[in-house]
Image (cartoon, rainbow, N blue to C red):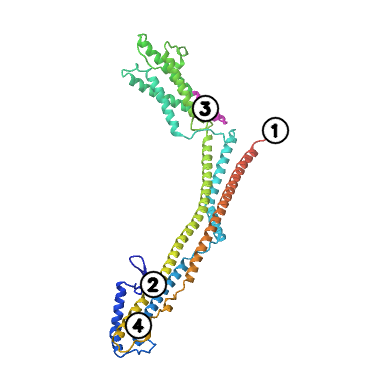
Amino acid sequence: MARTKDGSITLGSSYIPVGDDSSRRRIDDVVSKYNILLRAAEAGRKNEPPTNDAQLDETQRELIDESQGFVAGATRRAGAEITDRCNDIRTMLPAPLDTALEQSTIRREVAETKDRYRDDLAYAFHEQERTRRDLRAFEEENGLPPHSAVYKSDGAMFASLLLALTLCEGLLNAFLFQELQDRGLIGGLMLALSVGLANVLMGLGAGFLGWRLATHVRPPLRLLGILTTALFMAAALALHLALGDLREAIGREAIGRDAAAQIDFLVILKPWRWFAYTTIPPFVLFVVGVATFLIAAMKGRGGTWGIVAPYWGHDGFDRRFQAADEASHDAIANLKDAMQNAFDGERAKLRARHAAERERLNDIRRLVAEAQGVMRTLSDSIDAEIGRLHIWLRMYRDRNRAVRNTPAPKYFETYPAFEEWRKTRLDLTELMALAEQAESTLAENGRRLAALEEKTLQEQVTVIDGMIDTIMATERGAAGQVDKDEASRRPRSPK
């Protein structure tokens, strides 16, 4: 079967429309093949068939056989086309959706997904519990409240604030030292920046080493912290007193009372020179330096001011616990997402299969339409062939009648209708039944798929929420067990 340019369906060379060039050529070919006019003239001259004859002569029967063969061939080809389409439809029939089987498939996929992530989750929980035990053991040993480490994790902001603190002190103090060198403000700025950097570093040292160790439960470390604090604070005091004394000397030199202004760190050993200032700048210099030192020390000590915990070593244990805790929550989130993806992925597969079946249903409908077109084409071909057969019979009878000497048989005036040819020999019952089966199956699959999706969505929420609740209960139980274990190791107070 083929399609013409205008979209009509033809059965190879069997469909020859009336009035078409092909139809005229077939008429001429059959006329030539059977020598219709010559044989009609020869029979007419012999007055054959006889006037009283009611049977068709040999030539007319041959013409009928010619057309009948054409009709039989067209019918066979059309039947083959219908059979091919039936076979194609059978291969495209949608299978009924087994909701119980598909639901078990979804559950199996979810279970396999849970198994794949179980080891990661178990390892994350193990690390979380281990680091929690280490943290609580450290806190118990050092007399700290549970999970009491306070610090910030933004190192970039911490460094930026220290740099801003150093620059602010340097810019403020630069104006106080601009008379110190011939280079004026630049020389004073360099000195001020150096002083600011040293002051900030001493403050950080006092806070990070001294203040943090001064509260340690171990006497040697606590003593080290006290000594370190005293050392850094003494050094800072010496620096600030020396700078104040230097600024006072610069002021006296300016009015001719001092020959040369020099820095003297030993002024810390001369209490009578402390704060013996006659101008405001030395007081400002001292206050700014002390304030900068204290701020740097607070940031070095940590807590809400810095990036370490105020108690020495506390933040290290807490950071490891926080990292493990975050990893466990990530593992829980990964498991949750994986299970959701398992549910969603299986439902997406079912939707994709249903969409593919809808596309195949469109192909089935197209095949049905083509089969119906084949039926119409066959009917048109038979009608056209009967029309050509009438032409051949008319040509034969008219020629025969023109040359004979006796009246022509009465049947020359009538032409068979060949109604038995017009009755279709093709049966579309099976094909239409298959198409109807495909339609009903796909509609039922759509209803089952919608119900299955609703059911699995509810199951998804129940399963995942239940899993999260179980995990959270396990985590709370593990945390509580750690507290119980720590409490059991505490020495009992005497009654």
How many C-alpha atoms fall within 10 Å of the one at disc 3: few (<14), some, or many (≥20)? many
Would you place residue 232 above or below residue 431 in this image? above
Type of amino acid at the residue the image marks with label 2: Asp
Q: Gap between marks 1 and 4, in whole Å? A: 130 Å
Image position of 276 with respect to 173: above or below: above
Image coordinates of residue 25 in percent, x first then y, are 29, 76
Tell me how far mark 3 sits from mark 2, CA to CA: 107 Å
User: What's under tag 4, amino acid-wise?
Assistant: Leu
Q: Which residue is mark 1?
A: 494
Q: Which residues are magenta?
A: 207-230
Residue 228 in magenta?
Answer: yes
**SS category of the residue bearing label 3:** helix
Specify the amino acid type for callout 3. Answer: Trp
Query: Which residue is tagged 2?
Result: 380
> Measuring 41% from the left and 23% from the top, which residue is drawn there?
168
Whether tag 3 and tag 4 are in contact, CB under 8 A, the answer is no
Quadrant location, the C terminus:
top right
In this rendering, the answer to whether 442 lies above or below 193 is: below
Q: Amino acid at mark 1?
A: Pro
The residue positioned 56% from the left and 38% from the top of the image is: 135
Q: To which residue does mark 3 refer?
A: 211
Residue 117: percent from left, percent from top: 52, 51
Return the x and y of residue 378 as percentages of the image width and height.
40, 73
Residue 197 can be seen in this image: no
